[in-house]
Amino acid sequence: MRFVAWLADLLWLAHQRPDHYQKNPHRGMNPIKLPGPLTFAYATMGVFQIPGEAQYESPSLEGCKADSLTQNARHARIWWQWHSKVGNLWRQTHMNPGYAYAIRFELAPGETRELGRIVSGPPLKEREALRRKGHEALSVILAAARSMPDKAQAHSPETRSPEAVARRRFRLLSLHILAGRSSTITARYAQMAGMVGPDGKPLTRQAIMKQMRRIELLTGLPKDLKPGKC
């Protein structure tokens, strides 16, 4: 699964940063610059080559003559070659931590925020804080929700219970931290996660700021999980 996450990161970077032309020392290849049209078939054809964490079997290209291939087959052949090189790179470096890849690919910490394995700097520390202290933060938010019940009639009795309110607020806090404490990015993440307001519409930046200000005032919340300024 680590290879799948790593490969997904490369494809995400290629989609979001097509102008990133950093050359990798491995045979002068650039795994972030894709060799041809990005389709699901081309992107995933190397995934099933990985039976374990470090094993990678280079695909055979014997019998493929360029002059006898259709345009689609030529694209497939090029992608097989790309996957073969990427697989070899993974085989040689799979023990490296995610931040080592970020350095190798010349990615700033902010450019790794939406990646799964290639993460460095503040985004990495924020994820570690959520893993280590997330349960503690949820307990603080739940205690506050029980002491100040949500009486808004816009919510049903089930969704305005202290437990439901605490889960909703903690989930929003988690997205806010993963978004670098940007309310604008948090709103985008919340929409991607399917979170909506009482009216069934996507959460606005203003609504998120209001919730974060409430959480900021809670006593006992771990310092590195404070919302900060929105």
Image: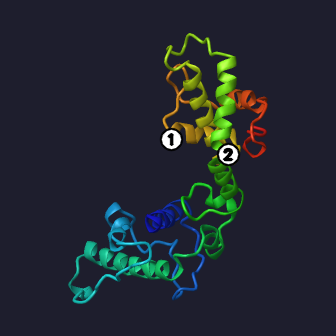
Q: For the point 51% across and 63% down, which residue is it?
A: 9
Residue 188's x, y, as percent? 58, 40
Colour setup of the view: rainbow
Give the structural element (helix, strand or loop) at label 1: helix
Q: Quadrant of residue 77?
A: bottom left
Q: Quadrant of the C terminus?
A: top right
Give left or right: position of 96 versus 177.
Answer: left
Above or below, comparing residue 11 to residue 79 in the picture: above
Q: Which residue is denoted by mark 1 in the rendering?
A: 192
Give residue 108's mark.
none
Q: Visible in this render: residue 185?
A: no
Neighbours of disc 1 within 10 Å: few (<14), some (14-19), many (20+): few
Expressed as whole percent of the image width and height from the top left, the position of residue 152 reads 60, 12
Amino acid type assigned to the residue bearing label 2 in the image: Lys
Amino acid type, residue under disc 1 in the picture: Met
Badge 2: residue crowd in 10 Å (few <14, some 14–19, many ≥20) = some
Q: Position of residue 62 (x, y in %)?
A: 25, 89
Viewer-nearest residue: 24 or 126? 126
- Name the quadrant of the N terminus: bottom left
Residue 133: numbered disc: 2
Q: Residue at x 47, y 62 (%)?
A: 5
